[in-house]
Each structure stands twice: as C-alpha cells, then as structure tokens.
Image: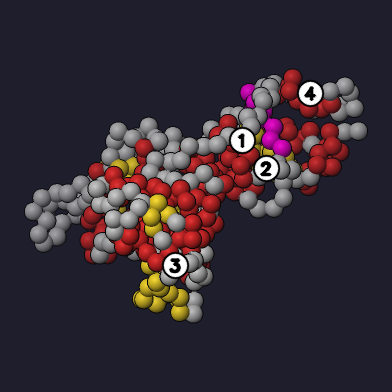
Amino acid sequence: MSTAAVISEVGKVLIASANARWREQLLMGLEDSSGRVYEASGGADALSQLEQGEWQMLYLDRRVPDLDAEELISLVRARFPRIEVVLLDSGATASARFGDPAQPGGWQTRERSIFGIDRVPANRMCDPLPGMVGQSPAMQEVYHMVRVIAPRATTVLILGASGTGKELVSRAVHQLSPRQTRPLVVVNCAAIPETLLESELFGFSRGAFTGAAQSYGGRIQAASGGTLFLDEVGDLPASLQAKLLRFLEQKEVQRLGSSETLRVDARVVAATNADLMQKVDAGTFREDLYFRLAAFPVTLPNLTDHLEDLPALVDHFLERLAADGRNPKCSLNPAALQRLESHPWRGNVRELQHVIERAAILAGDGEVIFPEHLRLPKRSGVHFSSDFEVTSGSAAAD
C-alpha cells in the first residue's frame, strides 16, 4: 500500500511552503493523489485556500515566510478543528521520500525522521487584544489573526460592519508590532474632502497652490517608521487610488508640486465596512489596489455573532463609566440582560456602549439597571425609526 493511497483515503491535502522545489518533492511522493493535493505559497495563501472547501490535512513548512508557523497552526486549530496539521522542515534533505505505511510505525514515523516533524501545539486561548473584551470563538479567531500578523510588516485589511471595533484592532496591530514606539497616524478617508485628501496624505511643496506658503510632509511621511491607518478606505477617491497603490508597491511618495520622490517606511493598515469586491465589480475601486490592501484580511464579527460576550461587554462599559466618575457602578438585572440579548444590534458594540450609558444615567443613583431603563431603537419594517422603545418591568421582544 502506497503513501498516496493513504492520502487518497484521507481526502484533500494542502502543502504550504514558499519553497517551490520542496513542494514539488512532496507532490512527487503523493503523485498518485495529485488530484487531491494542492499547493499554497505561504501562510496567508494557505488560510485563504482552507476557507474554500473541505480539507483533511495541511502540510506546513515551519519556514513559511509571511506568518509564524506555530501561530498559524493555532489559528488553523481554532478555525478548522477537523484538519490534521503536520509541521515539516523544508531545510531537511532534498531527496527525502515517504516510507512504506505497511511497515511498523507507518509512513508518519518515516516522515518524522526524514522531514523533522515537530509536535503540533494544541489550541490555546488567546488573551483579548488591548481595549477589546470577549472570549467567544469568533473573537478568539480575531485575536489569533492579529497576534499572528502584528509582528510583521504585511499590509492588513480590517473588514467589518460599523461599530465592530475596527479602529481598536488597528491600534492593536500597531501596539503588538515592533513599530509600537513610532507614530500611529490615523486618516479617515471619508471625513476629509476629496480636494484636500491628496495634500493631506502625500503633502505638498511650497507654492504648489495658492496659500501653500510652506512645504508640508503629509500624513504618510508622518507615519514613517510607524503605522498608517486608513479608515474607510473604500471611500478613497478614484483619483488617489493609483497614488496609494504606488506607495504600497514602491514605498515612495511624491508631494504635490514636486518632481522629487521620497522613500517612506510606513506599514499600512486599512479598514472598511464596504464590500470592496463589489466596488471592484462596479468599477469604483481598483482591483490591483484591493489585492494589495488585502494581503492579510481580518474580519470582525457582528455582535449578534458573539452574543456570549455581551455580559462581559456590559460589565466593561459599566466599569468604565464608574472609573470615569460619570456614574455609580451599576449591575444589570437578568430581565434587562434578556432584553439586550433579543435586540438585533445593527450598530454592534458601539450601539451597545451607548445603550448602556443611557441606561446607567436613567438608573440614577440606583445600583441596578432594569428593563425600563433601556432605550432601544424601534424597528419599522427592516429599518429603525428615530423613536426609542421603552420597556416596562419585564423583558420583551423587539
């Protein structure tokens, strides 16, 4: 019985390594199962492929360049618990082949001696990111993803609906990186008028336009050595997308009114609540820019996808109100918690924060928040009205 036959029984297999020759050698050992064996050139590529379809085994090169192998394994364990992970070393002998599984110990033992397999660590809980609360599986995935990518210079794209905590994640990427002592420069692409955004990002030379009495370096240059956070990047005007792409590819900026290019070492973290691929299809966002920004995407869940974190979030907001001296420390009545758990939370965690602050104010000097203290938006069809629904003593459905 050949190794390929064993793999065929297992199912789809993914080999992840930047070493093309090493991947080819493993493929040769599984040549009878080539239709079931696929390749990934790195850790991010492997994660992307694992998202699509059913997989049974991942062969991971410990020398994968874009992610830490052990952190990647932890992430795979959390997201794809049924996948068997085998950690190999591409630096082992180039002529290695699989052994005969019919022999004592089987081909896995043979792999261990030839390729230098290490023990794959069991999945472990990750501490929340700075400023974030929750231990649900959905949030654990976010923590793992951020801790995997933060130490590297890879561009990160944070995806998620409004109020899910995209700016908190961007700050965590910066704080957990080697750039933490350097600037974190935040640019909201939707808040700055298009006529000013180019000069704000790229700077300008003296005399570049009326009123330019002196040169200005721009926010990209201000982030040199640190991190540039582009919030609402989906709203970046088409006229600036090519310039941003050039910066991402060449790490060079050109100020308005100047022919000189400047090298800037700034890591880019971008965020959006928009469907960028939909914008690409509509022709309003460059496809090549999208793929540059999405080198490593991190998707934040809606609050309704991790409601088990809601009690911890409520306690966190109440403690902050008390610590700031804005309100005495309150607790939440069980019926009020039930009321919160039944709410659709279109505004996600940000909406919850505002609801809790209002409730604490309405509770006055009381130590307990009851359902009648909650002010939740009424729903009109699929939309919210501008009115608030007041609940009497018992919890009620929206």
- Residue pointed to by mark 3: 393
Quarter of the image where the N terminus is located: top right
SS under mark 2: loop
Cα separation, mark 2 vs mark 3, equals: 43 Å
113 magenta-colored: no
- Residue pointed to by mark 1: 123
Towards the viewer: 211 or 230:
230
Cα separation, mark 2 vs mark 4, equals: 23 Å
N-terminal label among 3 and 4: 4
* Residue at 61 percent of width and 42 percent of height: 78
The magenta span reads: 84-91
* Amino acid type, mark 4: Thr
Q: Nearer the viewer, mark 2 or mark 3?
A: 3
Q: Nearer the viewer, mark 2 or mark 4?
A: 2
Cα separation, mark 1 vs mark 4, equals: 23 Å
* Residue at 79 percent of width and 45 percent of height: 11
How packed mark 3 is, by other alpha carbons closer than 10 Å (few <14, some 14-19, many 20 or more), is few
The location of residue 103, given as percent across then percent down, is 89, 23
* Amino acid type, mark 2: Pro
SS under mark 1: loop
For the question of whether residue 6 can be seen, the reply is yes
Q: Is residue 58 left or right of residue 125?
A: right
**Tag shown at residue 109:** 4
The location of residue 84, given as percent across then percent down, is 72, 37
- Residue pointed to by mark 2: 81
